[in-house]
Amino acid sequence: MKDVLESTSRGLYCVPGDFYIDPCLPVNRAVVTHAHSDHARWGCKRYLAAKPCEQLLRMRMSPDAEFRFLPYGETITIGGVQISFYPAGHILGSAQIRLEYQGLVILITGDYKLGYDSTCDSWQPMRCHHMISESTFGLPIYRWPSQQVVFESINQWWRDCREQGKCCVLYGYAIGKSQRLLAGLDPTIGTIYCHGAVQKGNEAYRRTGIHLPETTYVGSVTGKHDWKGAMVVAVPSVHGTPWLKKFGRYSTAMASGWMAVRGARRRRSVDRGYVLSDHVDWPSLMTAIHECNPETVWLTHGFTATVARYLVEQGRDARVLDLLGRDLGEEDKDEEESSDEDFIDEPIGQGNESPEIEATTS
Ligand SMILES: [Zn+2]
Ligand SMILES: [Zn+2]
């Protein structure tokens, strides 16, 4: 694989194609998996991404950059390397990048999850020789509950708050998580308001043709307003700030994969924690590897060594891929738009111990 891809201080570099994948510093040519800031870096000269990523990427990156967008499944050849994008199911426009060079196929999953999400195309397996997979939640304790059950309990919390004359404040990242939450809310319960960063993301989703319930920008509400029974979707960074004062009596909730870990909700000091992640949990990570059936699995992010060890015990060739420079250029990583890594907590245990899910039972 080394002749094709190498880990450099600027990120994963494709040698024959002379481009970087999700570079961590500005480069000439960036091929990006999705629009989250730890993957799409500001300041690159040229960006290549999947077509449904267009609105989000243009919204986030400098307008002076050159953009090229490729529909899922189509191929472009750069320096003899065939590049194509396939849905990753993570957020709108997220892609797995498939590289083929002289018969060798490398798949870079980027952030991904399996299963249905009405706000983006679903992940699909790709056969490959080398699979570079994230393992953010690569421990057997991470098993996501059905999203239907999660959405039902969020809507029930909203109804309860409405009856108690409170306003709901639900935290999700500005891009991806918030829109998935919005799509799962029942707008017949009350009016939905959004923090400015979320509302901006909503507009990019709507321009791409994704249906979301009607939302009102919080900042557009002036004068005295009764927030009882309202749902406010906001970025986690407003938690504990004076921004919340205007809502009067309110209840807060966080939606994240990290809420599967005992104590996470308390540590974030929110009233509710809902287990909802846009990353693969342990069972779907194993399913993905099984279905892509690579000769070698390379693990990045999170519990890489644990997953690699487990796979080797299962008879697979699995290795940890050190992404050099991953900690560089992180200063522009806003909490609201980054992935769940910000919420790393001590896992409650190894093995098959089942985590207490504080969220969905209330
Ligand atoms: Zn990420
Ligand atoms: Zn992401």
Image (cartoon, grey):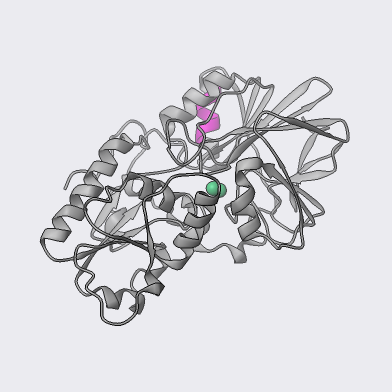
Image height of 79 relative to 101, above or below: below
Judge from the rendering whether residue 19 lies leftward or rightward of residue 229; answer left or right. Answer: right
**Residue at the left extreme, as displayed:** 164
Image height of 78 relative to 215, above or below: above
Q: Judge by depth and name the residue closer to the eye, 225 or 17.
A: 225
Q: What residue appears at the point 23 percent right and 57 percent down from the top-left corner?
A: 190
Magenta residues (range): 306-312
Q: Position of residue 233 (x, y in %)?
A: 36, 60
Q: Position of residue 169 (x, y in %)?
A: 29, 62
Judge from the rendering whether residue 286 lies leftward or rightward of residue 19; answer left or right. Answer: left
Picture quadrant where residue 137 is located: top left
Is the N terminus in the top left, top right, bottom left or bottom right quadrant? top right
Judge from the rendering whether residue 205 lies leftward or rightward of residue 129; answer left or right. Answer: left
Image height of 52 relative to 328, above or below: above
Q: What residue appears at the point 72 percent right and 58 percent down from the top-left corner?
A: 25
Picture quadrant where residue 356 is located: top left
Q: How many marks?
A: 0
Q: Position of residue 78 (x, y in %)?
A: 85, 36
303 part of magenta stretch: no
309 part of magenta stretch: yes
Q: Judge by depth and name the residue closer to the eye, 57 or 330.
A: 57
**Most frequent secondary structure within the magenta stretch:** helix
Q: What residue appears at the point 31 percent right and 34 percent down from the top-left corner?
A: 146
Q: What residue appears at the point 26 percent right and 37 percent down from the top-left corner?
A: 149
